Image (spheres, rainbow, N blue to C red):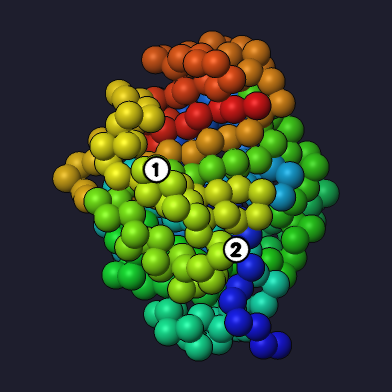
Amino acid sequence: MLFDFPVPTLDHVVVNARDRIDQAADTFRRLGFTLTPRGYHTLGSMNHLAMFGTDYLELIAAKPGDGSRPEIMSAPLGLDALVFATEDATATYEALRRNDVPIDPPQQFSRPVQVRGEARDAVFRTTRLPRSVSPAGRLYFCQHLTRDLVWRDEWRSHANGAVGIARAVIAAEKPDTPGGLFARMFGRHTVRETDDGCSLIAGLSRFDVVTPAALWEMFGGAAPDSRGRQDYMAALTVRTLSLDAVETALEAGGIRGWDRIGTSVLVPATEAFGVTIEFSV
Protein backbone atom coordinates (compact mmCIF):
# COMPACT_ATOMS: atom_id res chain seq x y z
CA MET A 1 0.00 0.00 0.00
CA LEU A 2 1.52 3.31 -1.08
CA PHE A 3 0.26 6.83 -0.51
CA ASP A 4 1.88 10.25 -0.41
CA PHE A 5 0.49 11.32 2.96
CA PRO A 6 -1.57 9.72 5.72
CA VAL A 7 -5.06 11.18 6.14
CA PRO A 8 -5.17 13.20 9.40
CA THR A 9 -7.94 11.64 11.48
CA LEU A 10 -8.19 11.77 15.26
CA ASP A 11 -8.18 8.43 17.06
CA HIS A 12 -7.84 9.62 20.64
CA VAL A 13 -6.27 12.11 23.03
CA VAL A 14 -4.24 11.17 26.09
CA VAL A 15 -4.27 12.79 29.53
CA ASN A 16 -1.25 11.86 31.61
CA ALA A 17 -1.98 10.86 35.21
CA ARG A 18 1.59 9.73 35.94
CA ASP A 19 1.18 7.37 38.96
CA ARG A 20 -2.14 8.84 40.14
CA ILE A 21 -4.65 6.80 38.13
CA ASP A 22 -7.16 6.49 41.00
CA GLN A 23 -7.33 10.25 41.47
CA ALA A 24 -7.53 10.91 37.73
CA ALA A 25 -10.36 8.41 37.27
CA ASP A 26 -12.29 9.95 40.17
CA THR A 27 -11.82 13.44 38.68
CA PHE A 28 -13.06 12.50 35.22
CA ARG A 29 -16.03 10.62 36.60
CA ARG A 30 -16.93 13.75 38.58
CA LEU A 31 -16.62 15.71 35.32
CA GLY A 32 -19.45 13.54 34.01
CA PHE A 33 -17.55 10.98 31.93
CA THR A 34 -18.29 7.27 31.90
CA LEU A 35 -14.98 5.39 32.11
CA THR A 36 -14.11 1.90 30.97
CA PRO A 37 -12.81 -0.58 33.55
CA ARG A 38 -9.11 -0.20 34.22
CA GLY A 39 -6.94 -1.73 31.54
CA TYR A 40 -3.38 -3.03 31.84
CA HIS A 41 -1.15 -2.86 28.76
CA THR A 42 1.48 -5.44 28.00
CA LEU A 43 3.84 -2.44 27.71
CA GLY A 44 3.47 -1.80 31.44
CA SER A 45 1.05 1.15 31.52
CA MET A 46 -2.56 1.22 32.69
CA ASN A 47 -5.54 3.24 31.57
CA HIS A 48 -9.19 4.20 31.61
CA LEU A 49 -11.04 5.41 28.49
CA ALA A 50 -13.95 7.78 27.92
CA MET A 51 -15.38 6.46 24.66
CA PHE A 52 -17.22 8.69 22.18
CA GLY A 53 -18.69 8.18 18.71
CA THR A 54 -15.52 7.81 16.65
CA ASP A 55 -12.75 8.89 19.04
CA TYR A 56 -11.99 8.78 22.75
CA LEU A 57 -10.11 10.27 25.70
CA GLU A 58 -7.54 8.10 27.46
CA LEU A 59 -6.25 8.48 31.01
CA ILE A 60 -2.78 6.91 31.04
CA ALA A 61 -0.62 6.08 34.05
CA ALA A 62 2.33 4.02 35.19
CA LYS A 63 2.34 1.66 38.13
CA PRO A 64 4.11 3.20 41.14
CA GLY A 65 7.75 2.16 41.11
CA ASP A 66 7.52 0.63 37.60
CA GLY A 67 10.13 2.12 35.26
CA SER A 68 8.87 0.44 32.06
CA ARG A 69 7.15 3.62 30.81
CA PRO A 70 9.57 6.46 31.63
CA GLU A 71 7.88 8.79 29.13
CA ILE A 72 4.81 8.81 31.38
CA MET A 73 6.59 9.63 34.62
CA SER A 74 8.87 12.22 32.99
CA ALA A 75 5.95 14.25 31.60
CA PRO A 76 3.73 16.60 33.63
CA LEU A 77 0.09 15.93 34.41
CA GLY A 78 -2.35 16.99 31.71
CA LEU A 79 -2.80 16.61 27.98
CA ASP A 80 0.25 14.69 26.81
CA ALA A 81 -0.51 13.01 23.47
CA LEU A 82 -2.57 13.42 20.31
CA VAL A 83 -3.10 10.15 18.50
CA PHE A 84 -4.04 9.78 14.85
CA ALA A 85 -5.98 6.86 13.42
CA THR A 86 -4.50 4.52 10.85
CA GLU A 87 -5.76 1.34 9.23
CA ASP A 88 -2.19 0.20 8.53
CA ALA A 89 0.55 1.29 10.93
CA THR A 90 3.29 -0.16 8.72
CA ALA A 91 2.11 1.74 5.63
CA THR A 92 1.88 4.95 7.67
CA TYR A 93 5.39 4.41 9.00
CA GLU A 94 6.73 3.92 5.50
CA ALA A 95 4.88 6.97 4.12
CA LEU A 96 6.24 9.25 6.84
CA ARG A 97 9.76 7.95 6.32
CA ARG A 98 9.46 8.79 2.62
CA ASN A 99 8.48 12.31 3.67
CA ASP A 100 11.55 12.56 5.94
CA VAL A 101 9.48 12.61 9.12
CA PRO A 102 11.31 10.90 12.00
CA ILE A 103 9.18 7.94 13.07
CA ASP A 104 9.74 4.81 15.14
CA PRO A 105 8.94 1.35 13.69
CA PRO A 106 5.49 -0.06 14.46
CA GLN A 107 5.01 -1.76 17.80
CA GLN A 108 2.24 -4.22 18.69
CA PHE A 109 0.79 -4.61 22.18
CA SER A 110 -2.47 -5.52 23.90
CA ARG A 111 -4.55 -5.32 27.05
CA PRO A 112 -7.14 -7.77 28.40
CA VAL A 113 -10.83 -6.80 28.18
CA GLN A 114 -13.77 -8.52 29.84
CA VAL A 115 -16.74 -8.84 27.45
CA ARG A 116 -19.82 -10.65 28.75
CA GLY A 117 -17.69 -12.51 31.24
CA GLU A 118 -15.12 -13.59 28.66
CA ALA A 119 -11.50 -12.40 28.75
CA ARG A 120 -10.28 -11.21 25.37
CA ASP A 121 -7.28 -9.17 24.21
CA ALA A 122 -7.68 -5.73 22.65
CA VAL A 123 -4.73 -5.48 20.25
CA PHE A 124 -3.07 -2.34 18.85
CA ARG A 125 -0.23 -1.42 16.50
CA THR A 126 1.31 2.02 16.93
CA THR A 127 4.02 4.01 15.22
CA ARG A 128 5.36 7.00 17.12
CA LEU A 129 7.24 10.20 16.43
CA PRO A 130 10.22 10.67 18.78
CA ARG A 131 9.49 13.15 21.57
CA SER A 132 12.43 15.26 20.38
CA VAL A 133 10.48 16.00 17.19
CA SER A 134 7.43 17.24 19.10
CA PRO A 135 8.44 18.92 22.37
CA ALA A 136 4.83 19.98 23.06
CA GLY A 137 3.79 16.36 23.61
CA ARG A 138 3.66 12.91 22.08
CA LEU A 139 2.32 12.33 18.55
CA TYR A 140 1.64 8.88 17.21
CA PHE A 141 -0.64 6.72 15.07
CA CYS A 142 -2.78 3.85 16.34
CA GLN A 143 -4.18 0.91 14.39
CA HIS A 144 -6.95 -1.00 16.15
CA LEU A 145 -6.93 -4.71 15.35
CA THR A 146 -9.94 -5.38 17.60
CA ARG A 147 -12.20 -2.33 17.32
CA ASP A 148 -15.19 -4.25 18.71
CA LEU A 149 -13.43 -4.51 22.06
CA VAL A 150 -12.87 -0.75 22.31
CA TRP A 151 -15.94 0.98 20.84
CA ARG A 152 -18.73 -0.61 22.88
CA ASP A 153 -22.09 1.06 23.33
CA GLU A 154 -22.20 0.50 27.09
CA TRP A 155 -19.22 2.86 27.43
CA ARG A 156 -20.33 5.65 25.06
CA SER A 157 -23.05 7.36 27.09
CA HIS A 158 -21.92 10.16 29.42
CA ALA A 159 -23.76 12.20 32.05
CA ASN A 160 -22.22 15.37 30.57
CA GLY A 161 -23.58 14.55 27.10
CA ALA A 162 -20.10 14.26 25.55
CA VAL A 163 -20.05 12.81 22.01
CA GLY A 164 -16.56 13.60 20.70
CA ILE A 165 -13.38 15.66 20.70
CA ALA A 166 -13.88 18.78 18.60
CA ARG A 167 -10.51 20.44 19.19
CA ALA A 168 -7.13 20.21 20.89
CA VAL A 169 -5.11 23.34 21.59
CA ILE A 170 -1.31 23.38 21.61
CA ALA A 171 0.71 26.34 22.92
CA ALA A 172 3.96 27.04 21.07
CA GLU A 173 6.33 29.99 21.11
CA LYS A 174 6.70 29.49 17.36
CA PRO A 175 3.44 27.98 16.02
CA ASP A 176 5.01 27.56 12.58
CA THR A 177 7.29 24.85 13.97
CA PRO A 178 4.59 22.30 14.92
CA GLY A 179 2.55 23.58 11.97
CA GLY A 180 5.46 22.74 9.67
CA LEU A 181 5.72 19.28 11.19
CA PHE A 182 2.01 18.66 10.55
CA ALA A 183 2.48 19.84 6.95
CA ARG A 184 5.32 17.36 6.46
CA MET A 185 3.21 14.59 7.98
CA PHE A 186 -0.05 15.21 6.14
CA GLY A 187 0.57 17.71 3.33
CA ARG A 188 0.45 21.49 3.36
CA HIS A 189 -3.20 21.56 2.31
CA THR A 190 -4.20 20.18 5.74
CA VAL A 191 -2.71 23.10 7.70
CA ARG A 192 -4.36 26.52 7.70
CA GLU A 193 -2.95 29.80 8.93
CA THR A 194 -4.95 31.52 11.68
CA ASP A 195 -4.69 34.89 13.41
CA ASP A 196 -2.93 33.26 16.37
CA GLY A 197 -0.91 30.56 14.62
CA CYS A 198 -2.18 27.64 12.56
CA SER A 199 -4.67 24.78 12.59
CA LEU A 200 -4.50 21.17 11.42
CA ILE A 201 -7.81 19.80 10.16
CA ALA A 202 -8.07 16.21 11.42
CA GLY A 203 -11.31 14.68 10.22
CA LEU A 204 -14.15 16.06 12.34
CA SER A 205 -11.64 17.59 14.75
CA ARG A 206 -8.89 20.16 14.54
CA PHE A 207 -5.64 20.89 16.34
CA ASP A 208 -5.05 24.60 16.92
CA VAL A 209 -1.46 25.76 17.52
CA VAL A 210 -1.34 29.18 19.19
CA THR A 211 1.17 31.30 21.09
CA PRO A 212 1.14 31.12 24.91
CA ALA A 213 -0.18 34.70 24.93
CA ALA A 214 -3.07 33.74 22.65
CA LEU A 215 -3.79 30.73 24.86
CA TRP A 216 -4.09 33.06 27.85
CA GLU A 217 -6.47 35.30 25.90
CA MET A 218 -8.61 32.26 25.09
CA PHE A 219 -8.80 30.71 28.53
CA GLY A 220 -7.38 33.15 31.08
CA GLY A 221 -6.99 31.59 34.51
CA ALA A 222 -8.56 28.35 33.25
CA ALA A 223 -5.40 27.64 31.21
CA PRO A 224 -2.91 25.09 32.57
CA ASP A 225 0.28 26.10 34.34
CA SER A 226 3.04 26.07 31.74
CA ARG A 227 5.64 25.16 34.41
CA GLY A 228 8.32 26.90 32.39
CA ARG A 229 7.55 24.98 29.21
CA GLN A 230 7.65 26.90 25.93
CA ASP A 231 5.58 24.34 24.00
CA TYR A 232 2.84 22.21 25.57
CA MET A 233 -0.51 20.59 24.90
CA ALA A 234 -3.02 22.68 26.82
CA ALA A 235 -6.74 22.27 26.17
CA LEU A 236 -9.54 20.17 24.73
CA THR A 237 -12.90 21.18 23.33
CA VAL A 238 -15.40 18.37 23.93
CA ARG A 239 -18.58 18.37 21.86
CA THR A 240 -21.69 17.80 23.98
CA LEU A 241 -25.37 17.32 23.25
CA SER A 242 -26.39 19.63 26.10
CA LEU A 243 -24.74 22.38 28.13
CA ASP A 244 -27.45 21.89 30.74
CA ALA A 245 -26.33 18.28 31.09
CA VAL A 246 -22.74 19.50 31.50
CA GLU A 247 -23.74 21.93 34.26
CA THR A 248 -25.77 19.28 36.06
CA ALA A 249 -22.87 16.81 35.92
CA LEU A 250 -20.32 19.36 37.13
CA GLU A 251 -22.54 20.41 40.02
CA ALA A 252 -23.17 16.80 41.01
CA GLY A 253 -19.43 16.10 40.85
CA GLY A 254 -18.48 19.07 43.00
CA ILE A 255 -16.33 20.59 40.26
CA ARG A 256 -15.29 24.14 41.13
CA GLY A 257 -14.49 27.23 39.10
CA TRP A 258 -16.31 26.32 35.89
CA ASP A 259 -18.07 29.01 33.90
CA ARG A 260 -20.73 29.06 31.19
CA ILE A 261 -19.78 31.49 28.42
CA GLY A 262 -22.14 31.70 25.46
CA THR A 263 -22.33 28.28 23.82
CA SER A 264 -19.66 26.64 25.96
CA VAL A 265 -18.84 25.64 29.53
CA LEU A 266 -15.22 26.10 30.57
CA VAL A 267 -13.58 23.91 33.22
CA PRO A 268 -10.20 25.14 34.52
CA ALA A 269 -7.16 22.90 34.25
CA THR A 270 -6.87 22.85 38.03
CA GLU A 271 -10.15 20.89 38.14
CA ALA A 272 -9.36 18.53 35.25
CA PHE A 273 -5.96 17.03 36.06
CA GLY A 274 -3.95 19.67 34.25
CA VAL A 275 -5.94 20.05 31.01
CA THR A 276 -8.39 22.85 30.29
CA ILE A 277 -11.70 21.38 29.10
CA GLU A 278 -14.20 23.38 27.12
CA PHE A 279 -17.59 21.75 26.58
CA SER A 280 -19.30 23.09 23.48
CA VAL A 281 -22.47 22.32 21.54
The residue indicated by pointer 2 is 8
Quadrant occupied by the C terminus? top right
Q: Give x and y (percent) for residue 276.
A: 41, 33
Going by the image, does 275 lie left or right of 205? left
Outermost residue on the left side: it is: 228
The residue indicated by pointer 1 is 195
Picture residue at 38% right of the left edge, 30% below the top? 218
Front-most of residues 237 and 145: 237
Q: Give x and y (percent) for residue 10.
A: 60, 56
Residue type of the residue flagged with mark 2: Pro
Would you call the spot at circle 2 few (<14 residues within 10 Å), some (14-19), or many (20 or more)?
many
Going by the image, does 267 lie left or right of 122? left
Above or below: residue 44 compared with residue 231: below
Regarding mark 2 in the picture, which secondary structure is present there? loop
Picture residue at 65% right of the left edge, 55% below the top? 203
Q: Give x and y (percent) for residue 166.
A: 59, 41
Going by the image, does 270 lie left or right of 169? left
Q: Can residue 66 be seen at all in this image of the molecule?
A: no
